[in-house]
């Protein structure tokens, strides 16, 4: 029987996983929006939900607090993000202890963006860890944690080529990672290419594609640019004619995301991970269009 509190085992147990990601809000208004969305999305019975970790570890306390509250006050299984950036190993040990005391045993281990932001030179923290694979090994050495990692459908922006990117993913797998979640997928073929490269190097774990619908073209372009990629031409061909009609653009963005989800599931994806941006409406619309039983 799979351990229903360990995401790695849940993803290998058969059936599709559907999960949601949230981020710690900056103020009281954002907090209200977050918990309203969490309440609305709980009705969809996700396999798990995750809470991100701010740049440089800046949201550490809020990440732990939100993850703890999800664990204690909802029916959902939470996963906390943890990054190498800005922390010594002693500080990382303290955070792991806080998570354990909160009853949280699922962690997404990330290197994190450089302190200067995506695309700037990487600067390690003295007394800390350099790579996500080191963080995975660090967490696994503490036992009783299910550890996941990030994967990149078109390669990490700092990787010199896709082969190198695959070797980095394999290093995380070898260190004990049990599953991976991708940054937002823009084309199904990018995801299947990633899965193929992972298999070729022996990274034999579930890889869950990340989903983010286009609701605002300017915001999506910014996020795609920060990941070192470009919007697919076939997507722009459908979206650009609607640039001056926000409602029509949003509706088309939901259709594109729904079609992508269908293609990914048909291609064998073990599930879907929705980047909610702390809102529930778009995710609920995609669920309804996919006819996912809740």
Image (cartoon, rainbow, N blue to C red):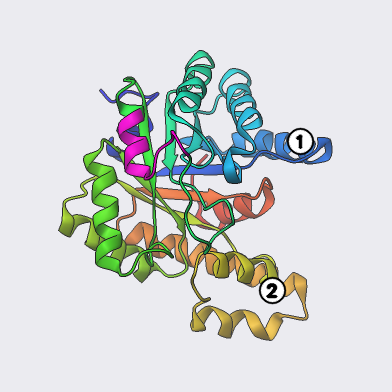
Question: Going by the image, does 60 lie left or right of 165?
Answer: right
Position of residue 259 relative to residue 51, above or below, is below
Element class at badge 2: helix
Q: Which residues are magenta?
A: 126-138
Tell me where residue 3 sits by quadrant.
Answer: top left
Quadrant that contains the N terminus: top left
Q: Which dot, 2 or 1, sits closer to the camera? A: 1
Q: Residues within 10 Å of mark 1 (few under 14, many from 20)?
A: some
Q: Name the one closer to the observer, 242 or 122.
A: 122
Direction front: furthest residue: 126
Q: Residues within 10 Å of mark 2 (few under 14, many from 20)?
A: many
Q: Can you give x and y, in whole percent of width and height, for residue 219 in the image?
A: 68, 66
Q: Quick check: is 189 in the magenta stretch? A: no
Sequence-first tag of 2 and 1: 1
Q: Residue at x 63, y 72 (%)?
A: 252
Q: Residue at x 56, y 24 (%)?
A: 75
Q: Residue at x 24, y 50 (%)?
A: 170
Q: Name the one closer to the observer, 185 or 149.
A: 149
Element class at badge 1: helix
Count of all numbered marks drawn on residues in the image:
2
Which residue carries the number 2 mark?
249
Which residue carries the number 1 mark?
31
Q: Can you give x and y, in whole percent of width and height, for residue 96 in the image?
A: 47, 23
CB atoms at circles 2 and 1 under 8 Å apart? no
Distance between mark 2 and mark 1 Cα atoms? 28 Å
The disc at residue 187 is none
Question: Going by the image, does 23 lie left or right of 87?
Answer: right
The answer, for residue 16, to whether it is visible in the render is no
Q: Can you give x and y, in whole percent of width and height, for residue 126 in the image?
A: 46, 38
Q: Residue at x 53, y 62 (%)?
A: 120
The answer, for residue 102, to whether it is visible in the render is yes
Position of residue 139 relative to residue 49, above or below, is above
């Amino acid at each position: 029987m799979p351990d229903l509190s360990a995401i790695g085992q849940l993803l290998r147990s058969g059936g599709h996983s559907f999960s949601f990601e949230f981020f710690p809000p900056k103020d009281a208004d954002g907090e209200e929006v977050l918990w309203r969305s969490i309440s609305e999305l709980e009705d969809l019975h996700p396999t798990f939900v995750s809470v991100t970790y701010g740049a440089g570890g800046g949201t550490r306390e809020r990440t732990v607090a939100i993850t703890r509250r999800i664990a204690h006050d909802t029916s959902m299984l939470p996963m906390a993000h943890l990054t190498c950036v800005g922390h010594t190993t002693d500080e990382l040990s303290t955070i792991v202890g806080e998570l354990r005391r909160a009853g949280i045993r699922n962690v997404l281990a990330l290197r994190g963006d450089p302190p200067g932001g995506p695309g700037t030179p990487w600067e390690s923290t003295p007394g800390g860890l350099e790579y996500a694979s080191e963080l995975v090994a660090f967490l696994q050495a503490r036992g009783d944690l299910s550890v996941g990692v990030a994967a990149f459908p078109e390669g990490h922006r700092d990787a010199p080529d896709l082969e190198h990117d695959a070797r980095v993913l394999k290093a995380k797998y070898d260190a004990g990672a049990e599953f991976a979640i991708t940054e937002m997928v823009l084309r199904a073929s990018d995801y299947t290419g990633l899965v193929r490269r992972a298999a070729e190097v022996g990274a034999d774990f579930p890889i869950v594609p990340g989903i983010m619908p286009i609701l605002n073209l300017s915001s999506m372009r910014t996020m795609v640019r920060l990941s070192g990629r470009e919007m697919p031409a076939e997507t722009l061909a459908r979206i650009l004619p609607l640039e001056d009609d926000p409602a029509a653009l949003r509706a088309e963005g939901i259709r594109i995301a729904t079609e992508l989800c269908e293609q990914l599931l048909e291609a064998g994806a073990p599930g879907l991970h929705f980047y909610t941006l702390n809102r529930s409406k778009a995710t609920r619309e995609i669920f309804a269009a996919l006819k996912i039983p809740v």
